[in-house]
Image (cartoon, rainbow, N blue to C red):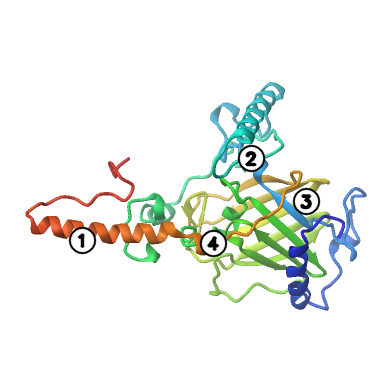
Amino acid sequence: MTRRLLMATTVLFGLLIPALASPQAPPSASNSAGRASSTPRTPWGDPDFAGVWSSDDMRGIPRERPDEFGTRRLLNDEEFAKRVERDNQTRTTESNRVGAFRNDVGTRTFRQTSLVVDPPDGKIPALTAAGQSRNRTRNRGSFGDGPFDTPQDFTLYDRCITRGVVGSLGPAIYGNGVTIVQSPGMVAISYEMVHDTRLIPLDGRPHLAAGMQQYMGTARGRWEGETLVIETNGFTDKTAISGVRHSAALRLTERISRVDDLTLDYQVTIDDPETYTKPWTMVLQLTQPPGFQMFAYECHEGNLGLRNILSAERAEDTAVADDLKKGIIRPRRPPQGGDSEN
């Protein structure tokens, strides 16, 4: 590999991937067409994307485009200068702050006006009637008011199970690392937060049979010149994208290409006709900040929130029952405290 890899990651995937890769994998399409001389190659000739990357530099970019920018995908020079000033102030503040999540900020500033680039107005399309119905009744997990009777009343994220394909790439408050490892006929993508890993065959094998569903779907990849194209289907309807529960009809198309030595361009198109009125696309720049590395995400081991919310609700059950015995009739106290409507 020509990119840097953490030794532990190399050992982990070096043992795993060759056993899964097809020994009869056909030559990559990129071996015979359109090579960019500046793109590093693997020993077997594919574009080399391997390394540890981060979406931290995208944290200051809004998901949907503010109205003032219309259909402009990029900031002009004046707007960009203001964003650079803002980001520099944030970095200075973070470097001097004490406490949790300190310095979980990016090191570079980009011109994108929004993460959503299609539709041209940078807005997520409207939900279908089915999508609206599904999300009116969706479980809001630890950010909602319950009811919280069992672990199943929480989101998969709250339960340390998964953030889904799109959610796993962030950018979130922390844990925005992603490791890419390659071998002939196979690519592995491992995410820092909740530590999901996707194995993506490149050998032309079919998707799983209809009806086979997985939280992260079934991914199949191919090279189109210098771009890695990943098509994924076979999802459950249990995960969400940008806070919206999608349907099992979801199809994702991801396109990853190298911009320069320290940057990958990542595009994902969300196509779910049972949830959105039309497909839409987001773009992220994945970068390699100086000294960046991924850390272990021991989610289940430290998941006290789930236990504490459930135990607090059972304590409220007892308190309501005790008050009723005293002739006191009152509503339950909302889990979030205060007015549950706010």
Residues under numbered marks 2 and 3 in contact, where contact means CB atoms less than 8 Å apart: no
Report if residue 155 is visible in the image.
Answer: no
x 37%, y 62%: residue: 153
* The N terminus: image quadrant: bottom right
The span from disc 1 to disc 2 (Cα, nearest Å) is 44 Å
Instruction: Give coordinates of residue 32: x percent, y percent.
Output: 91, 61
Give the mark, 2 or 3, whose residue is nearer the N terminus.
2
Residue 150 visible, this angle: yes
Q: Earlier in the sequence, mark 3 or mark 1?
A: 3
- Residue kind at label 4, given as amino acid type: Thr
Question: Circle 1 sits on which residue?
Answer: 318
Amino acid, disc 1: Thr
Q: Name the residue under label 4.
A: 162
Q: Which of 341 and 174 is in front in this view?
A: 174
Q: Tell me the quarter of the image containing the C terminus.
A: top left
The residue indicated by pointer 2 is 105
Mark linked to residue 257? 3
